[in-house]
Amino acid sequence: MMGFEVLPLGSRSLSAMNTFENKDNDLETGKLIKDGEKTARSNKVLKIPNQALLSGFAYCISSCSMILINKFVLSSYDFNAGISLMLYQNLISVIIVSILSFLGIISTEPLTWRLVKVWFPVNVIFVGMLITSMFSLKYINVAMVTVLKNVTNVITALGEMYLFSKHHDSRVWAALFLMIISAISGGITDLSFHAVGYAWQIINCFLTASYSLTLRRLMDTAKQVTKSGNLNEFSMVLLNNTLSLPLGILLIFIFNEVDYLTRTPLLRLPTFWFVMTLSGVLGLAISFTSMWFLHQTGATTYSLVGSLNKIPLSIAGILIFKVPTSLENSASIFFGLIAGVIFARAKMRERSQT
């Protein structure tokens, strides 16, 4: 399996991550520490903050870049084939990971039928999450997309409560309420409001929360059906992106993107292919860093940081794409940022109390 030398950042294997998660008083699953395991916890706790911070930073950089370049392709180039863009990005990821695995730089699990059957529900949600993100980003400006993503935190928190018996304190729920208010006020004051885009974004919030919760729930089962009994990050990236290819091809025909692809002159531009390929590389980066970060923290923290990266992302989105805005809309976005900070502080306090 993938050793320490494979990742310069020092990421541990997935089995080591889950070992810690099962022994700790896990914030996301609500599992209690066993008395005989507290010593093991004290030996590992020093490594976790650095891993969580590093993986969170990598996730923010890759996800911010990914959103900006997707917006550039979909809006600036006016590319009307979001599913095809997703398919190409995932194909690039599969090619890169396969080459690295073939050269022995990384280690990946072979794809077996048993593993595919276990992972299929996760992959369906994964594809839906990517496609709805493309569709919403086509119509909504980057700043409002990032504010609306706060709704994902609310859905995830509710999912944790029912699936993992994780209960949050009043400060967390107050922060989540502020996030909802900022999303609603932001939508009302959005000068470029588009109902179709907002509908796709709401669906995306549900799918994003479902993805993080389902991934965490099925991880142990997936490991049990692998040949080695483990499943590292690169194996999951390869598994997710490989399984998304046939489903993506099917959806291209269902949504009739084939006709558009045969007529658009964009596919004859070398610069467009360069941007598309760059987006594929970023797709691999966000696939790996998101899984890495999820294993280091949990579903709520994963969704939280995904929304907190709107601080630099919103500013960049407004400036780069010259988005028309108003004082009311800017205030709503700022309110959403403050709500995110309050939520982060509430989660930190909740973790220290447990």
Image (cartoon, rainbow, N blue to C red):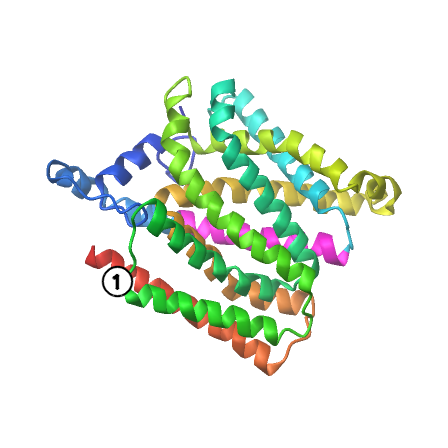
Answer whether residue 308 is magenta in the image. Answer: no
Would you say residue 297 is visible in this rendering? Answer: no
Residue 35 vs 54, above or below: the answer is: above
Q: Position of residue 48 (x, y in %)?
A: 29, 45
303 lies left or right of 328: left
Q: Quadrant of the N terminus?
A: top left
Position of residue 338 measured from the top left corner of the image (x, y, whole percent): 43, 72
| Residue at far left of view | 35
Number of on-image labels: 1
Question: According to the image, label 1 marks what residue?
Answer: 349
Whether residue 178 sits left or right of residue 77 in the image: it is left
Quadrant position of the C terminus in the picture? bottom left
Q: Is residue 285 left or right of residue 132?
A: left
Q: Is residue 231 above or below residue 217?
A: above
Note whether residue 165 is visible.
Answer: yes
- Residue 61 magenta-highlighted: yes
